[in-house]
Image (spheres, coloured by chain):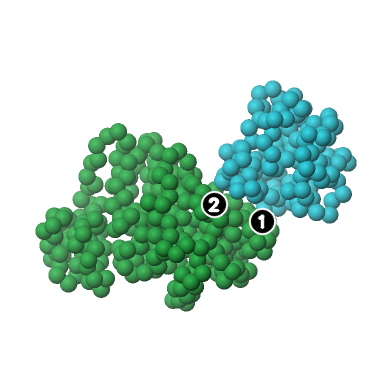
Amino acid sequence: MRVKKIVLLLWCCCFLLCGCTVSVSLPTESSAVQASLSGYTTDTVPAYTEEAFVEINDNVPCFTDKDYTTQSFETYGELDSLGRCTIAYACVGKDTMPTEKRGSISNVKPSGWQTVKYDNVDGKYLYNRCHLIGWQLTAENANKSNLITGTRYLNIEGMLPFENMVADYVKETNHHVLYRVTPIFDGNNLVARGVEMEGYSVEDSGAGISFHIYAYNVQPGIEIDYADGSSWLEGTQKTEPSAAQMTYILNTNNHKFHLPSCSVASSIKDTNKETFQGTREEVLAQGYEPCGKCKP
Amino acid sequence: MTIAVCIDDKNGMLFNNRRQSQDRVLIEDLVALSNGRKISISPFSKELFAGDEVCIVEEHFPDKADEDTICFVENIDLTAYADKIQKIILYRWNRHYPSSLKFKLDLSPYTLTEQTDFPGSSHEKITREVYVR
């Protein structure tokens, strides 16, 4: 895994020199991961209307000559200081695809995770543990660097069609596809507003597969607070999440705890910052005091 | 004319000017169905029939098709040819892919005369449906 991370960092540096846009932020340990490598933020993609995804950059992926390889690989960026996924990048080939039955991923709780059901959601559960790179492409099961809190709609209508297209292309042609997925968060939000997805078939120079899209992490009929993943039916009032589902940011130095949206929380040094999920009583029992500003 | 089309679960045909999917067994199935007749295709589809002598490759091929012609269509909106189409061979991928070009022909004037499932080379189940006006 360490080698994968080093490769990803080197690749990021190369991208900064050669990328198709210039305003980018590297996935780092800081909490300021707001733009994808190609520079997209929630401010620069169209607002959601009725389609699960939108084409961006004229549907042209931002891979460069340095990326083009027919050697399969997969890399997963480290979680940031808020425990959020940063980026997943692979050269998908037949040899990265699963050969065994899929395992359980229920032990992973991605940032902002909430277990909540609605009658108007397909399968009832609002959130899925969404693979950045789909299991059918790289056979990653419970890899916490590859799983985000995503709506059912994002998973099935936004991301799965592209995973299917790439998987079937690779199986049919035995070619390779560069495949990169970047979750995009606003500020310190724990739930991504969407994911940027890029794909490019290498052996035929993109003739078979070439796309660059942004898929919305929304669920029709449901409102979502992306700060912590809480949700409510469209047209109703937001109800506060139960105490058992709270997420707090801990300052392990002064033993204060904060809401994820608290401005004080974003100024905590990475070395003193931890994400806590549980009840308010539990964090108090650990000797932490509530922040005087956000009053969690 | 007869048209043959591949579509996904959302009636999609094409995304970003690229076919949604491909399968060599499906092409073999279509060639077998043609029973020796030439299949008209566009240059876009030529690579799928590489090595086959069963195709006529030309632009705007549905315009030139007569009653006996089989046209394999990937990247054309067929609604403009609705009146000419006597028979439809519809291949369903039974998968959901992204799409920007949809199959929009109204099937209500046609009768479903055949429905067959078969495994492809890279697809678990492809469904072939035949509609006749």
Quarter of the image with the C terminus of chain B is top right
Q: Which mark is residue A109?
A: none
Q: Which residue is mark 2?
A: A58
- Closer to the camera, B61 or A110? B61
**In the displayed structure, would residue A277 be above or below residue B15?**
below
Q: Colour of chain B?
A: cyan
User: Mark 1, residues whose alpha carbon is within 10 Å: few (<14), some, or many (≥20)?
Assistant: few
**Quarter location, residue B126:** top right
Q: Position of residue B121 (x, y in %)?
A: 70, 53
Tag 1–tag 2 contact (CB < 8 Å): no
Task: Count the numbered circles shown.
Answer: 2
Question: As drawn, is A23 to the left or to the right of A289?
Answer: right
Can you see residue A144? no
Quarter of the image with the N terminus of chain B is top right
- Closer to the camera, B126 or A221? A221
Secondary element at tag 2: helix
Q: Amino acid at mark 2?
A: Asp
Secondary element at tag 1: loop
Q: Position of residue B122 (x, y in %)?
A: 67, 53
Please tell me which residue is depicted at 57% across the width and 71% down the height of the picture. A66
Q: Which chain is green?
A: A
Q: Which mark is residue A207?
A: 1
**In the displayed structure, would residue A16 be above or below residue B114?**
below
Please tell me which residue is depicted at 44% across the width and 44% down the height of the picture. A153
Of all chains, the one bearing label 2 is A
